[in-house]
């Protein structure tokens, strides 16, 4: 909104056209307050555009008016019983949320398209627009079939509720063919009904990038692995020793713990450091594409094959390291092909008959429980033993909390430099809060959260309030903690259950105790638990939790 206060009472009065304003009314609630406020808008002939009431924040109203009339409206509003103050705002809260969502959507490298129940596009990011040759304005509200110029897998997902990953799609625009991969998921409401669907889109031109990154310039060494905990010190020491050998290493650990970082550091420390390091995300591509990229192909092996054939990554990684990430995701056929390479030390290109010797060191990684997969018959035991020559298990972040402060500070510094925002730092309270969280997404989740904060705010000091503004932080906190080992129920041994309300009260008290420990104020605890400050204060009194 371009109008400032000075324009309303000062020189701006010359402008007589209607303008849009957003105001915030702080109030003490009472029956009929909303009615009295709206009556004043009616009486002054002012058009309300939208209205939103946020508990403890106030009532936000967007309206259209002649600037001169706003003065009078303010005077009258101030006299309404219950109105505590009025001020201008730049935007409505929903506009701020929309802006925030757009920033997040545009900060990811894949295309995103979301549709509603009717198959109309509700959200689309800039990457998707670039791939699909459209624009946010044109695509928003459009039928998804119109945008994809055919029935896309996203619409099948909307109808069936079934998700699928990495489906190949083609769009014929008349003068060119656009190729991309889509992964589609349904959006469900709390009752499990389909209310929309969302698709992530990868451009085919990006595929090479996803699949293999030959990086000689960015040297990642063991110094890049920030750590402090005894467990990580021991792991890094072991990794340095095994890096110098030539055995296959299997990196285990939850997603985001740093498996790829270790793989790169191991390559750098090895005798193959001057050769290429090629990382392949085995889960990122359909089987046929993965096969032809890894093993290469001969001319005429399939339609679309390059003339003269193409070398595969096993050949390209000669004298270097091939990092097979997400190895637990490969299909049974690929498992057989990979086993052959590891046993024979040779490959055969797709459509070829010649055995080509390979000279690569294999590093593999997975977050999956391969032993359990073997038991279920999903992963070959012989391949497992070939890969698991030297296993290195990276512990999740929640098991090495001492690492959180130095990693967080290191990441924040790097992100701040990248965004040209110097001097940004985490307060001691923030570091304590970060240490108390379970981080199911490990270092990557921590990195993403800090990146979002640096992107969206301009503050130099990151305090717990700011961290709490990021909802996923609060959610992850509970995802990780609300299991039985954190809560106890006292049920009498004779088996007689206490009344339900007493059970609820026992749990409620324990939840409050835990949340209050990590929150600076009752207001913050209220925000985390989605209740008002007053509710928290009353419950603290009820359970004797006041300090
Ligand atoms: N100890 C650490 N010090 C500094 N940065 C780290 C550390 N551990 C992880 N990171 C960073 O966290 C992010 C995720 O790490 P990485 O990609 O290596 O994890 P991963 O285990 O391979 O994840 P996935 O299983 O999802 O592929 C990267 O940006 C990486 O640089």
Image (spheres, rainbow, N blue to C red):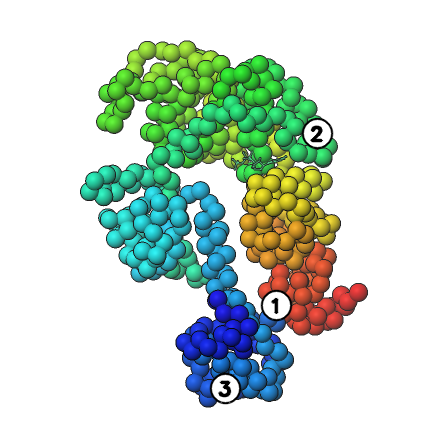
Residue at 63% of width from left, 47% of height from top?
438
Quick check: 44 above or below 167? below
Q: Is residue 87 visible?
A: yes
Please report whichever mark, 1 or 2, sits nearer to the chain's N-terminal start. Answer: 2
Q: Of marks 2 and 3, which one's residue comes earlier in the chain?
A: 3
| 104 versus 310 height, above or below | below
C-beta proximity under 8 Å, tags 2 and 3: no
Confirm or reject: label 2 Cβ below 8 Å from ligand 1. Answer: no
Percent coordinates x, y for residue 375 in the rendering:
49, 32
Q: Residues within 10 Å of mark 2 (few under 14, many from 20)?
A: few
In the image, is 494 to the left or to the right of 164?
right
Q: Give the image quarter of residue 255.
A: top right
Q: Secondary structure at mark 2?
A: helix
Q: Position of residue 395 (x, y in %)?
A: 63, 35
Tag 3 secondary structure: helix
Residue underneath mark 1: 531
Which residue in the structure is indicated by mark 2? 233
Q: Which residue is mark 3?
A: 40
Q: Is residue 401 left or right of residue 105?
A: right
Identify the image quadrant of residue 343.
top left
Quadrant assignment for the C terminus:
bottom right
């Amino acid at each position: 909104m371009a109008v400032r206060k000075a324009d309303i009472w000062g020189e701006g009065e010359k402008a007589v056209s209607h303008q849009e304003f957003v105001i915030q009314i702080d109030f003490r609630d009472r029956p009929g307050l909303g009615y009295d406020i709206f009556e004043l808008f009616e009486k002054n002939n002012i058009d309300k555009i939208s209205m939103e009431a946020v508990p403890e924040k106030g009532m936000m109203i967007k309206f259209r008016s002649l600037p001169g009339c706003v003065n009078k409206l303010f005077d009258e509003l101030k006299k309404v019983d219950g109105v505590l103050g009025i001020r201008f705002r730049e935007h409505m809260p929903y506009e701020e949320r929309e802006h925030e969502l757009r920033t997040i959507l545009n900060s990811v490298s894949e295309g995103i398209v979301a549709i509603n129940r009717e198959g109309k596009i509700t959200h689309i990011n800039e990457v998707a627009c670039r791939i699909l040759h459209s624009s946010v304005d044109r695509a928003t509200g459009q039928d998804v079939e119109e945008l994809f110029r055919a029935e896309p897998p996203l619409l099948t997902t909307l109808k069936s509720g079934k998700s699928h990953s990495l489906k190949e799609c083609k769009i014929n625009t008349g003068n060119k063919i656009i190729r991309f991969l889509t992964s589609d998921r349904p959006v469900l409401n709390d009752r499990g009904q389909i209310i929309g669907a969302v698709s992530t889109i990868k451009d085919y031109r990006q595929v090479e990038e996803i699949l293999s990154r030959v990086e000689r310039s960015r040297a990642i060494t063991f110094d890049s692995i920030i750590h402090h905990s005894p467990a990580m010190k021991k792991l890094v020491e072991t990794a340095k020793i095994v890096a110098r050998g030539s055995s296959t290493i299997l990196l285990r650990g939850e997603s985001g713990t740093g498996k790829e970082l270790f793989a790169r550091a191991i390559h750098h420390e090895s005798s193959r450091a001057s050769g290429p390091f090629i990382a392949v995300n085995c889960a990122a591509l359909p089987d046929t594409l993965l096969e032809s990229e890894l093993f290469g192909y001969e001319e005429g092996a399939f339609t679309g094959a390059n003339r003269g054939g193409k070398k595969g990554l096993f050949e390209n990684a000669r004298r270097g390291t091939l990092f097979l990430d997400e190895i637990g995701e490969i299909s049974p056929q690929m498992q057989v092909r990979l086993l052959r390479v590891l046993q024979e030390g040779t490959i055969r290109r797709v459509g070829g008959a010649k055995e080509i010797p390979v000279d690569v060191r294999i590093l593999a990684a997975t977050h999956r429980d391969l032993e359990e997969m073997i038991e279920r018959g999903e992963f070959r035991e012989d391949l497992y033993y070939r890969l698991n020559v030297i296993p290195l298990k990276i512990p999740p972040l929640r098991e090495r909390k001492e690492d959180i402060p130095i990693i967080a500070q290191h990441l924040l510094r790097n992100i701040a430099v990248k965004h040209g925002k110097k001097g940004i730092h985490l307060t001691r309270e923030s570091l304590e809060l970060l240490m108390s969280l379970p981080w199911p997404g490990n270092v990557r989740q921590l990195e993403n959260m800090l990146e979002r904060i640096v992107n969206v705010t301009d503050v130099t000091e990151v305090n717990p309030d700011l961290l709490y503004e990021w909802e996923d932080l609060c959610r992850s906190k509970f995802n990780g903690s609300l299991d039985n080992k954190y809560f106890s129920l006292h049920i009498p041994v004779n088996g007689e259950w206490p009344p339900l309300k007493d059970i609820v009260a026992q749990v409620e008290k324990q939840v409050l105790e835990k949340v209050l420990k990590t929150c600076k104020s009752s207001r913050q605890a209220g925000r985390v638990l989605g209740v008002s400050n007053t509710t928290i204060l009353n419950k603290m009194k009820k359970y004797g939790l006041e300090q």
